[in-house]
Image: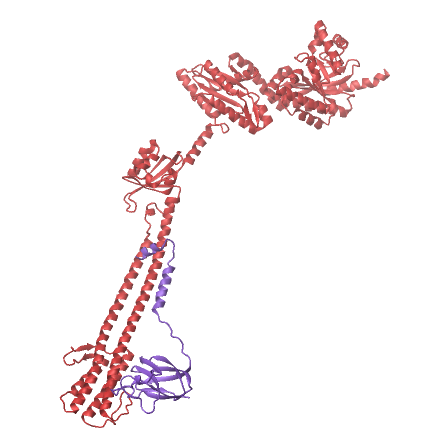
Chain colours: A red, B purple
Amino acid sequence: MSRSRLFQPFTVRNRRTVALILLMFALYSTLSVALSIRATGRSRHRAVVVQVAARQRTLAERYVTDVLLARDGMPSDPASTASLLSESADVLINGGEAPAVDGDDDETDLPPADGAVVRLQLRQAQLLVHDLIDTGNAVLAKESVDSLPERASEDITTDDPVQRLRILSAMTSNVSLNVARTIAVTTDENIAALIRLQMVLGAVGVLAALLLGWALIAAIRRQTAHFRSLVTASTDLVLVFDNNGCRYASQSVTSMVGKSEADLRGRAFAQFVHDNDQTMVQLACLRGQPREFIFRMRNRLGEWRDLEGHLTDLREDRQVRGVVLNARDITERVKLEEELTRHAFHDGLTGLANRALFRDRLDQALARSTRASSPFAVLLVDLDSFKEVNDSLGHDAGDRLLQEVARRFAGAIRVSDTLARLGGDEFVLLLDDGREADAEAAARRLLASLAEPVSVAGRDLTLGASIGIALHAGGPGDSEDLLRHADVAMYAAKEAGGGQSQVFRDAMGRELGEMLGLQHELRQGLQRGEFVVHYQPAIAIDTRAVIGVEALVRWQSPTRGLVPPDRFIPVAEASGLIHGLGEFVLQTACMQASQWGADGLLPENFVTWVNVSGKQLSAGHFSAIVRRALHAAQLDPSRLGLEVTETAIVTEGPSGERARDELKEIHDLGVLVALDDFGTGFSSLGQLRRFPIDVIKVDRSFIQGAEHDAKDAAITANVASLAHALGLVAVAEGIETERQLTLAHEFGCDVAQGYLFARPAPAHEVSALLAEALTVADTRPTS
Amino acid sequence: MVLGQVNAVGKRRCPWAAVALVAVIITAACGSSEPAAQGTAVKVVESDFEIKVQTNVTAGDVVLMVHNQGPDDHELIVVPAPVGELPMRGSGLTVAEESFKPEPLGVLEPGAPGSDRRLQLHLQPGRYVLFCNMSGHYLGGMHETLVAS
């Protein structure tokens, strides 16, 4: 249905129906009037017949009088009366001109008698008239009446001619009256029949008209309802405008703005339209042009809704006489479009700009800087220990933490600055016109915004952040370089302990560049299997027997050659690669120990020692990793020892606490624990009692220094005696000469380790050594 | 006008009320039936100018089934048969009905030719005269005797 049709409730079909009803009424009226005219005409004729028939009665009585007067010689004219009687009787039956009586009546034209009963009665009257005249003639002639015929089946018993005349006259006048009455009754019946017919016709007409009218109204109602539902029930807004402004507003409009239609009439409608759109909408609704436009309207809640309007110019349409505005709420669509645009340039989690938008802004800033030599700064922010939150509290908590951080950062910056999330826990801030002082101030604000603990998953977390600042003095530049510089500076800040900012310097770039390169290669190396585990035997000083090995990781880099652990372990720890690397060493060592055991190469109480980083201990779940490694290798826990540095377990705070708990749990499994590099940390000797420790390894510097330095010698002796006092085993590391071995023995060390006995070697070499040692042990009793 | 009426009736009312109204009008235009009479049926035929009826009838409740063959209209009056002739009025043309006290046993007013009428009577054993008292008809031969026993 076209829009213009909406305003024409009468369709062609319905107009035909109306015409049909009118035609039927006309036919009925014509029929009714024709019937009435015919009935009236017949009634008029009958009235004349009645009049003539009634006159017969008078004539019959007059005839008797005339006959009796004539018989007695008085002047009278019975023959004339008889003639009138006879003629009238004929005319009444057959029609024709009724004779006038004494000039009283005009000659009357009669139709032939109508109706069987009337004709029979008139016939009887005629017969009686003839009998009457015969009897009259007999009276006048003074003849007998015995032989006279009785035409009308009468059975008159009297012989008196006058009595017979009177009887026949009475009968004639009686039948004449009856004819008149019959005609009257017939007329009444005809009129009643006519009335009935009229009533039935009328009733049928009314019924038909009602049914047709009802059907028509139902059709109109359906159509109107259809129209109404299109206009009112639809969510589309429908408005009609004329020169005086709004003339009609559909229900959807009134319910949208929360005003009655009267409040929208005329110029009032414009107040609901956005200021910027008012003129356009008013002009369009006045002119009917343009046909389509988008505008904003305020709804009952005061929100601006985006509407798509279509105009239909129906000013020439007599049904409408106005410009019809159909408008559809497209707010959701507009929002969706904005949302899609936003998604392309915004981070879904935090709503901040994403990497793409940031790069775009950065390129713009560079272009501006190239033109105007304006400075700007890039601040790269990385949350400290975010990974731990994510690991321990789950990703949902991590996401909420990032959202809160984003909210705080957004509150700490200027509107003109661009804050973006690059991914993970990495944020970046672009400071337009930012010099070093501005950038450092911004960094301080960001750090300050994290001072308040963040409440996530029912825990209050205090987060730090490391911020790297890259400054661009002005002029051309490269966005990649800027981001890399900020990254390097951020690493420097992290290296310096986190919770601070660092401005990028060229020197920093070289150092950190080297470190980052190493980190990259480490990761690759781990994946490519460039790491191997070597084993260095430990010797019981008194028996010179091999009682254990220390597993040491070696990195055979294809580009760097053999890289010493002190070169790559710190990098692995800083990057988190230590976890994967540590697990690799642990598993390999356990498998090897198990293999040796299966090969029957291991003496009693032989322990394989594995170094564990403090990072591994404090990350949590390390006891589970150890259990898994033992289980996988089918290794008795007492065959495994873990070496930890004292810094790893004496650290204060949650991470130190966690490390101690983990260590306790592992120790409870039966795994031995050695305190490595003892003497280099800050732990007091008294603290040793608190830790689950079986072995103390005296740092090589003390053993090697003891040869020349009395102080070192004293320390070593003290440590060893303390160890013994606590029921621990003391191990001397780094024994390279017989002299050092002798000293270690003198100091009271139980076990020695060093090049004097064996360098760290691949597993197969150690296997050979172990086999040889077994042979020595076997042969010793015989030697 | 019809549309206006329907609108006035109501929104969704169907026109069956109007149909019923029309049906009532049509029914009212037609006639109604008479109550039935009880007793021994006796056929009486009137014509110009004669009455035909059986001579004897069992006394008690009697219903005269009167048919007028016409062509004239006729009455039917029933009276106990007197000794001799029926008394006549002064004109000598009609029977003096009023002389029967308190009134004639049965009277049917003039009936049109072709009509059928009923006259309910309770007849004691005896003789009765049936006649038409329209002017001249009695003398013209319209009388008959009925014996109830």
Q: Residue lying farthest front? A: B102
Vertical arrangement, residue A360 with respect to residue A78, above or below: above
Where is residue A288? Give x, y as percent.
30, 39
Figure quadrant of the C terminus of chain A: top right
Vertical arrangement, residue A780 with respect to residue A192, above or below: above
Does residue A111 show up? no
Tell me which corner region of the image, top left, top right, bottom left or bottom right, holds residue A118: bottom left
Callout count: 0
Where is residue A240? Give x, y as percent.
32, 41
Q: Nearer the viewer, residue A261 or A758?
A: A261
Where is residue A13? Give x, y as percent.
33, 54
Vertical arrangement, residue A218 with respect to residue A645, above or below: below
Q: Nearer the viewer, residue A82 or A415?
A: A82
Tell me which corner region of the image, top left, top right, bottom left or bottom right, holds residue A700: top right
Lateral position of residue A299 relative to residue A429, left or right: left
Q: Nearer the viewer, residue A456 or A486?
A: A456
The residue drawn where x is 14% and y is 81% is: A102
Tell me which corner region of the image, top left, top right, bottom left or bottom right, holds residue A217: bottom left
Q: Residue lying farthest right? A: A782
The residue drawn where x is 35% and y is 71% is: B31
Q: Nearer the viewer, residue A256 or A576?
A: A256
Where is residue B63? Give x, y as percent.
39, 82
Vertical arrangement, residue A72 with respect to residue A254, above or below: below
Does residue A144 show up? yes
